[in-house]
Image: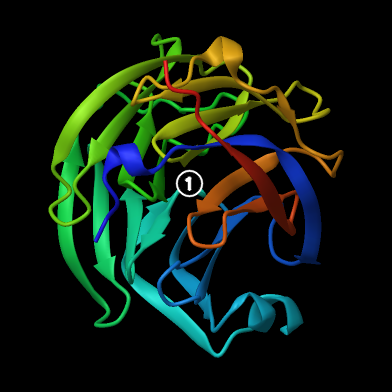
Amino acid sequence: SAPCFADCVDIISNIRSMKILKRAGSPKGMWIRDPRSSKVYVFNGTAGDFIYQFDSVLDFSSSLGLHSRRRIRLPHQWVGPASAVHNGYLYFIMQEADTDMQVVKYDLLSGSVVETTMFPVEERAAVYTLNPETAADLAADDEGLWLLYAGSDSEPYINLAKMDPATLDIEQIWDTHCPRDNAEVAFIICGTVYVVYNTRPASRSRVQCLFDVNEMVMSEEAPLVYFPRRYGAHASLKYNPEDKQLYAWDDGYQILYRLTMKRKVFM
């Protein structure tokens, strides 16, 4: 059962270590581990209709490139390195040329689509300006399923929606006041959004804006977290609530960041 909001009070204090697992696939993509099953899913590129499944992080790191025993072909094309895996389900963004954006819930065990929902955005606008392929970004943490998106291209800030993982109903929406401009990626831990910024040309990624739905931490008191110097810029950063690590894809390198956490200060 999902912990209630107040139970999850961790905030990042710094990045303890960085482990480069391998270099496989395209410069952009994402990889993620299902907290429940330990299976790893790899999304190569910024769109596609199949994904790779590995038995574990070890299985992925020791395999040759993206060669896995299981390649899952999906009934719809996913767009953006922006999917989430939560309790055996894959959640991904689908967007055909002229249609609204949709969130799709796919059962990885039975291989079928369980639920889809239209997401009301006025136009296709990238949620992070440094990764224009990411129209919207799904994240799963200890508190459930989230969607980061841009209301329209003229909207300067990143919006956040809390979704019901079972039905995909939108439960609540916030304006994070975190700028989309120069944003690279974002991730969510304990209901707190961490937006990572960079420059063009890419230099050092850093967390520069925070938004906490529980209003327990203010952006001003947030630790300024710098990522260790790496290759270019993250295409995706996905938090795993079970092992408390970030699964990163940076210029074709698959990286694990281990985090040091501290408790949020109650106001």
Q: Is residue 51 visible?
A: yes
Q: Work out whether 17 lies above or below 130.
A: below
| Residue 119 image position (x, y, % from top left) | 21, 36
64 horizontally vs 214: left or right: right
Question: Residue at horizontal 76%, vertical 22%?
Answer: 200
From the image, which quarter does the N terminus lie in? bottom left
Q: Which residue is mark 1?
A: 80
Question: Residue at horizontal 24%, vertical 82%?
Answer: 110
Q: Most extreme residue toward the bottom, as rendered?
A: 69
Question: Residue at horizontal 23%, vertical 42%?
Answer: 163
From the image, which quarter does the C terminus lie in? top left
Residue 66 occupies quadrant: bottom right
Question: Residue at horizontal 35%, vertical 54%?
Answer: 92
Residue 206 occupies quadrant: top right
| Residue 184 image position (x, y, % from top left) | 62, 31
Q: Secondary structure at mark 1?
A: loop
- Residue type indicated by callout 1: Gly
Q: Work out whether 160 lies above or below 256.
A: above
Circle 1 residues within 10 Å: few <14, some 14–19, many ≥20: many
Q: Work out whether 179 lies above or below 70.
A: above
191 horizontally vs 258: left or right: left
Q: Is residue 152 visible?
A: no
